[in-house]
Image (cartoon, rainbow, N blue to C red):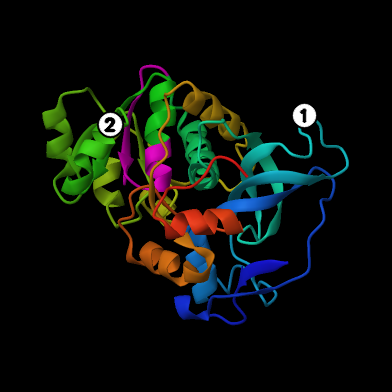
Amino acid sequence: MFALIYREYGGPEVLTVGSVPEPHAGPGQVRIRVQAASVNVWDVKVRSGRMKDVVQPAFPVVPGIDASGVVDEIGPGVAGVEVGDEVFGLGSATTAELALLDGWAHKPASMTWAEAAACALASETAQRALEDLRVGDGAVLLVEGASGGVGSAAVQLARALGATVIGTCSERNGDYVKSLGAHDTTYGPGIADRVAALDVGRVTAVLDTAGSGSLPELVELVDDPRQVVSVADLDAPELGARAVRNEPRAIGALETVARLYADGRYRVEVERLVLLEDAATAHRLMEAGHVRGKVVIAVARQDRRVAARGSAGSSTP
């Protein structure tokens, strides 16, 4: 089968389209014929070699953690899904013709393949952090980096739980963050004064999705530094804050997102949809930062034709 691969660590230029063996669904897994796959910061870090002391992948590596597609093989012990179902979810080596998912949800009919590929890891990570912070009705949550993939998911999931949300972002993304249901403000020094000016009450929890070095000021916004959780700064504990736990995955977030999207209460932003053959561009965009939502790669051949025409994707295989 065809797949995006790299045979050595390096910059985006090491990415190429090649051939790898087909995977087969094991216990608790489904295999999908991939329509689209998103690019995550983790993919970029692993490809560059920055994570080689943490993970040692076997070359050639097929990047990708989340994807959308059509189920074509079901592993032992799996219920509630059939061959031919349209799903999105989490797995590994997803930027390929076929990929295995360990967690998934059915794709709403109105959701494009690109949107579906963009929301799985972001929403799961956001939900895990919200659970760590015990965000619920009456909470006042500040999301640092609210226009990114995880940040925008956190804003919407927290609002669905009844929380008041403040989202930090660049000035150009202020209207977007407000459209998600948050009070927007800019990030950077002086955040305490800007938050106070919003007059929405004392911040009870902070989620840092940016890892921009703002934690010293963010911990001052809450009564207890442990009410600050970062998904981007592993050094958070040095300031009394917490790094988001890695396990167990909050797979239930996928069903929640599917339901909210179908009800018109969840938005997925795809800043750019690129062709598989142009995957290096997607990785460069992620490395540059300040992406609104997610960057997605069109994997299936028909979606690659759609991407070439400049569309956000197709919702039919």
Amino acid carrying mark 2 in the image: Ser
Residue at (86, 37) in percent of width and height = 77
The reply to whether residue 138 is visible in this rendering is yes
Quadrant in which residue 168 is drawn: top left
Q: Give the range drawn in magenta.
A: 137-153
> Depth check: 153 or 134 in front?
153
- x and y percent of residue 175 in the render? 21, 37
Callout 2: SS = helix
Relative height, residue 192 to residue 300 (above, below): above
Residue at (33, 66) in percent of width and height = 288
- x and y percent of residue 57 in the render? 66, 71
> Depth check: 188 or 223 in front?
188
Q: Is disc 1 surrounded by few (<14), some (14 to 19) or many (20+) residues within 10 Å?
A: few
> Depth check: 95 or 186 in front?
95
- x and y percent of residue 163 in the render? 36, 22
Image position of 167 (left or right of 256)? left
Relative height, residue 295 to residue 150 (above, below): below
> Depth check: 31 or 224 in front?
31
Q: Mark number for residue 179? A: 2
Q: Mark 1 points at which residue?
A: 80
Verify whether residue 51 appears in magenta. no
Q: Compute the Cα span from label 2 to label 1.
A: 34 Å
Which quarter of the rendering shows the N terminus?
Answer: bottom right
Residue at (69, 52) in percent of width and height = 33
Image position of 63 (left or right of 239)? right
Closer to the chain start, of discs 2 and 1, is 1
Which quarter of the rendering shows the C terminus?
Answer: top right
Amino acid carrying mark 1 in the image: Gly
The reply to whether residue 221 is visible in this rendering is no
Q: Mark number for residue 53? A: none
